[in-house]
Amino acid sequence: MAPVNPAPPRSGARFGFELLTTDAGGTEARRGRVTTAHGVVETPVFMPVGTLGTVKALTPAHLLEIGAEIILGNTYHLYLRPGLEVVEALGGLHRMAAWSRPILTDSGGFQVFSLRDSARIKESGVTFRSHLDGSAHELSPERAIAIQETLGSDIMMAFDECPPASASPAAMRAAVERTTRWAKRCIAARTREDNALFGIVQGGTDRALRERSLADLVDLPFDGLALGGLSVGESRELTWSTVAALAPQLPADRPRYLMGVGTPEDLLVCIGHGVDMFDCVLPTRNARNARVMTPEGDLNLRNTRHRLDDRPIDESCACYTCRTFTRGYLRHLHKAQEILFSTLASLHNLAYLIALVGGARAAIEAGDYASYRDELLARRRSGLG
Amino acid sequence: MAPVNPAPPRSGARFGFELLTTDAGGTEARRGRVTTAHGVVETPVFMPVGTLGTVKALTPAHLLEIGAEIILGNTYHLYLRPGLEVVEALGGLHRMAAWSRPILTDSGGFQVFSLRDSARIKESGVTFRSHLDGSAHELSPERAIAIQETLGSDIMMAFDECPPASASPAAMRAAVERTTRWAKRCIAARTREDNALFGIVQGGTDRALRERSLADLVDLPFDGLALGGLSVGESRELTWSTVAALAPQLPADRPRYLMGVGTPEDLLVCIGHGVDMFDCVLPTRNARNARVMTPEGDLNLRNTRHRLDDRPIDESCACYTCRTFTRGYLRHLHKAQEILFSTLASLHNLAYLIALVGGARAAIEAGDYASYRDELLARRRSGLG
C-alpha cells in the first residue's frame, strides 16, 4: 500500500542566496534567488501565510496553480495545535500539509508578545498561557529553534522581543538589546545544517535604534535578515520611511525580509527600497471579508452595485476565479455565506499579489522598476474599481 | 475582452433515455444513459446537491475531477437567493455557477411544505414566507415551471404536495390527488422543449396509494418519474420496502429517480430495485460535520483515535483528499475549524458515492449486481473503519 503521500523530496541543497541583478533605473529594487532544501524561490516574493498548516480555504493544489513558491507556518499556533507530537507523527510540516516547496516559520515571538496579559517576560524566555485553553507554556530562543527544527522549516526566524508601536523609548531600547542577546542564543541552539536562520532587526520607527539593532546582528552568522516590528500600528508613512532608511543598509548578499507586510502599495514601495521577501495574512483575511484586490483598487463584493455584474473581479487576472466566475455570483456566494466564497476570493487575492511581485521581478530585470511601481500605484489610486 | 466564462455549450440534443441493459443476475438493477442538452449522464447516477448554485465547499473543477456528471439546484432557495433577476443577468444557472454539464432542479415543493407554520396551501398553489426575511411569496405548478425554465434546468421536477411521514391516511390520499391535478398543470405550463420534466409519485409508505399515484401519472407525458416523499422520517426498512414494491413498476423506458436518498446502503439496495438516479445532501453535510465514508463504514474524524493516524480516510480511494492528506491532519483541520476541512471531506464523500455508483454500473454490465451490492454491504457492516 502506497503511503498517503511521500515525504516531500529534499534537494540536499544548502541554503543560499544569489543576487541576480539590481534595478538599473535608480531604485534599490533587487532580483534574487533563494535556494533551500525544498527548492528555489525567486525574489522579490510574496509568501502566503498558512498559520495552522493550511493557507486558509485553499488546497496546496490551488497554491501551486497560482505559482506560490513558499508559504509560512506559525510556530506559536502549530505548537499549540495540532502540537509537535502530531506534526512529527505525520512526517513534519511539509508532509502533513502536503506542501513540497519551501516553508518559512516565524519564531512565535510576535504572538507571545501580543498576549500581553498572560505573558511573563524574563531573560530566559517568555511564559504564557495558551489562547485556546489557558494552559501554561514557555518559549525561549532555544525552544523556538527546537520547535522550528521539529516542524522541518526551511527558513527559521530568530526568537525576538516585539514591543508594541506604543512602547516607550526605554522599552524599545531594552527590546533591541534583548533581541540581540536572544539572537546569539538562537544561533547557538541550532542542531541542523539543512535549513536557514534569519535574524530580526527591531527598533520601532527610531532610525538610530534600528541602525544599532542592525549593527548588533549584521556580523552574526544569520542566513538572512528581517525587519520586524513594522506595520504594527504606526502610520503607513512611518513604515515606509523606516523601510526606506533601513532596507538598503541590510547586507546585499543576504535576503531581506519585511515581516507581516502587506498591501499591494506596501509591496510596490518596499520592493523599491530593496526588500526581497514579504508575508501577510491580509490577502486571505480580506478575501474572507469580501474585500478583493484589483489593479484599480480594492472592491468590496458585499456592495449592492455588484449584484447583476457579470464581469470577473479583474479582467486582466488569469486566476481560476477570474477566468470562471462573475462579481454578481461571488456577491451571491458571500451573502449566502457559502464556503466556496472564501476559497474563490482567497485564490484571487493571492494570485493578484503573486502576479504583482512576478511583474516586479520582470521590471527589475528590464531595468525600470520605478515605472512599473509608479504606474501600478497610480492605477490603484485611480479607484476605478 | 473575453467574457468571464462563455455560456456553456448546448448540444441541441433533445432529452432522452436509453436503457442499455438490465442485470442478468436477477436483481432489478438497470444500466442506462440519459441525454440532455448539456450532455450525457450514465445511470445509475448519484447527483451532488448544489442548493444555492454551489455544491457546498467545492469548486466546479473539484466536481469535474471526481466525475460528477449532473448536479442539483434547489428552486425554492435559488428563487429567494440570489433571485431570478440575478440568475438571468448572469446568464442562467449553468453559466452563473460555471457548470457546463446537466442540472436537475427540484420544484420547491418539498421546501415550501416543510415551512408548515408559514405555508398556506390552496388548490391554486402555496403561499409562504421566506425563511430569510419573512417576505411573502407564492409557488404554484405554473410558477414552479416558469422558475425552473428561467434557471435553465435540464431536468425540471413537477410541483407536488409533500406530506410529512406522519400525515393521516386521509391527508396522504388528498396529497396524492392534488399532486396528480398539479402534475397536469405543470405539463400544461411548459414553454420550452429543450429540457425534461419528471413527475413525482407520492403516497408515503402506503403501497396501494403509491400504486394509485403511479397509475395517475404514468400516462402523462413526463420524461421520467420520481419517487418523492421517502426518507422523510419513516424507518429505513419502510423506505426500502416501498422502493422495492414501486420502483420496478415505474415505466422501464424512462428514468427512475429516488429523491433525497441517501446513504451508501440506500444506493446499493435501491439500485438493486431498479432506481437510476439519486440525490442527497448527506455526503456534503456529513462531511462538514467530520463524518466521512469508507468501504468499512463511516468514520468520525473528530475522534481522538485519529490524532496521530497517518493513513488516508480510505486507502482504496483515488480522490485528491485520499491521495494527499492523512486522517491526523484532517482531524487537526476540523478541530481548528479550518475551511479547508469542509472542502477536503466533501470532496472525498462525493468521490466515494460517485465511485460506488460507477462500480454498480460496471457490475450491472457484468451481469452480477447482487454480488457487488452484497459484498459492499457486508464490508460496510463490518465496521472496521
Image: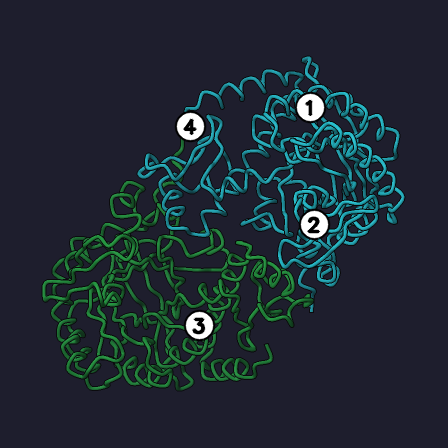
Chain colours: A cyan, B green
Q: Residue B256: x percent and y percent?
A: 30, 72
Letter of the chain that mark 2 sits on in the rendering: A
The numbered disc on residue B361 is: 3
**Nearer the N terminus, badge 2 or badge 1?**
2
Relative placement, left or right, of A175 versus A308 is right
Residue marked by disc 1 = A243
Quadrant location of the C terminus of chain B in the rendered image: bottom right
Disc 3 crowd rating (10 Å Cα; few below 14, some 14-19, many 20+) is many
Residue marked by disc 4 = A385
**Nearer the N terminus, badge 4 or badge 1?**
1
Give, as a three-letter code, the residue at label 4. Answer: Gly
Give the CA distance from mark 4 to mark 1. 29 Å
Give the CA distance from mark 2 to mark 1. 26 Å
Letter of the chain that mark 4 sits on in the rendering: A
Residue at x 30% of width, y 76% of height? B230
Which is more toward the observer, A209 or A275?
Answer: A209
The answer to whether the residues at label 3 and label 1 have Cβ atoms under 8 Å apart is: no
Give the CA distance from mark 3 to mark 1. 64 Å
Residue mark closest to the camera, 4 vs 1: 1
Residue mark closest to the camera, 2 vs 4: 2
Residue mark closest to the camera, 3 vs 1: 1
Can I make out residue B144 in this image?
yes
* Disc 2 and disc 4 on one polypeptide chain: yes
Which is more toward the observer, A214 or B10?
Answer: A214
* Disc 2 and disc 1 on one polypeptide chain: yes
Give, as a three-letter code, the residue at label 2. Answer: Tyr
Residue marked by disc 2 = A76
